[in-house]
């Protein structure tokens, strides 16, 4: 009534983004980006070969492709464009993971004929073998994940028979087992605040895997999914939610949950296909 009008601008936060790989109708896989609500689905790679297991930092996705042989590491911008080959080792490489600032890369290489854990600069140069303190003739490494500070790695090793999760300093040294169990623990993913590692395990039911979180400092484990379906490949979003893969009647789907309300599972609609290996695009990586 006094002739003064007020304007209120409501700012709606953009939904988090994830990257993942998706099977095409011809059976090959490509890397995609999508909003957590299923919007803005964008295809980032277009090779007729398999492009899988993306990891992101500093506006780019690094992934594995078999387009030139056994399986090498490539990179592409998160907005799409040219894809660049990073490794030419002549042996298979898999499970790449970039540190939060993109300066370091960890991955698994079959150099020497057995899966071993390697680290390198963010562009895959200056690669070196992580101190092989758990090695035996049949020990296999898999699924590395950087701590937020980039000073430690979580990874899977079969040194005790079953697949178990360990952590080790970037420079190597003594590896510590995390979340000890009689079952198989897989797919570790370090939380953005450094406090937790999420993983998949059959520790409570040998017939299926569910999602768990372990407190890195105390070793306390909490189950955060309890489904009759197989759950796996967890990865953190910057806000503390978890994206993961679930398998229903043999078909894979992407979902997310809030660890504080794990009973509510949210579907991520990516259309037709078989999605896998979701990873959150952390703030500042776009």
Image (spheres, rainbow, N blue to C red):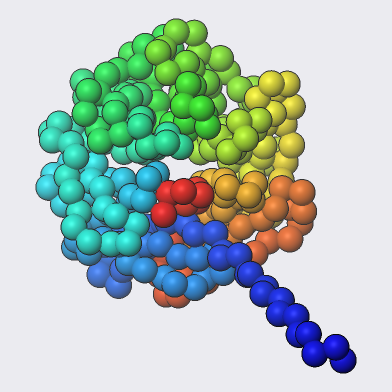
Quadrant of the rendered image containing residue 116: top left
Looking at the image, the residue that sits furthest to the right is 1
Residue at the image position 54 percent from the left and 46 percent from the top: 235
Above or below, comparing residue 144 to residue 137 in the picture: below
Residue at the image position 37 percent from the left and 45 percent from the top: 58
Residue 94 appears at what percent x and percent y?
A: 31, 38
Q: Quadrant of the N terminus?
A: bottom right
- Closer to the camera in the image, 223 or 284: 284
The answer to whether one can see residue 66 in this image is no
Instruction: State how many labels appear.
Output: 0
Residue at the image position 71 percent from the left and 80 percent from the top: 7
Residue 212 appears at what percent x and percent y?
A: 66, 39
Residue 25 relative to residue 173: left or right: left
Residue 199 relative to residue 106: left or right: right
Q: Quadrant of the C terminus?
A: bottom left
Residue 281 appears at what percent x and percent y?
A: 47, 51
Residue 174 appears at what percent x and percent y?
A: 49, 8
Residue 19 relative to residue 203: left or right: left
The answer to whether one can see residue 145 in this image is yes
Residue 54 relative to residue 36: left or right: left
Above or below, comparing residue 126 to residue 278 in the picture: above
Residue at the image position 42 percent from the left and 70 percent from the top: 41
Looking at the image, the residue that sits furthest to the front is 2
Above or below, comparing residue 48 to residue 204 in the picture: below
């Amino acid at each position: 009534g006094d002739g003064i009008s007020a304007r209120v601008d409501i700012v709606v936060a953009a939904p988090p983004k994830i990257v993942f790989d998706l099977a095409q109708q011809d059976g090959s896989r490509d890397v995609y980006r999508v909003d957590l609500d299923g919007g803005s689905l964008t295809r980032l790679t277009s090779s007729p070969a398999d492009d899988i297991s993306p990891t992101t930092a500093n506006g780019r996705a690094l992934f594995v492709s078999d387009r030139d042989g056994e399986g090498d590491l490539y990179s592409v911008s998160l907005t799409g464009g040219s894809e660049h080959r990073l490794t030419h080792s002549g042996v298979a490489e898999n499970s790449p993971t970039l540190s939060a600032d993109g300066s370091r890369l960890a991955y698994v290489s079959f150099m020497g004929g057995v899966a071993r854990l390697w680290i390198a600069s963010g562009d895959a140069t200056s690669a070196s073998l992580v101190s092989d303190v758990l090695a035996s003739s049949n020990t296999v490494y898999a699924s590395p994940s950087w701590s937020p500070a980039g000073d430690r790695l979580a990874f899977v090793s079969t040194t005790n028979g079953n697949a178990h999760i360990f952590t080790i300093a970037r420079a190597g040294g003594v590896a510590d087992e995390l979340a000890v169990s009689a079952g198989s623990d897989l797919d570790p993913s370090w939380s953005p605040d450094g406090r937790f590692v999420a993983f998949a395990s059959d520790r409570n039911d040998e017939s299926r895997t569910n999602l768990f979180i372990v407190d890195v400092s105390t070793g306390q484990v909490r189950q955060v999914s309890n489904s009759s379906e197989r759950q796996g490949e967890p990865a953190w979003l910057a806000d503390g939610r978890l994206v993961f893969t679930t398998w229903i009647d043999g078909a894979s789907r992407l979902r997310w949950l809030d660890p504080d309300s794990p009973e509510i599972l949210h579907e991520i609609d990516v259309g037709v296909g078989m999605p896998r290996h979701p990873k959150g695009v952390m703030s500042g990586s776009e």
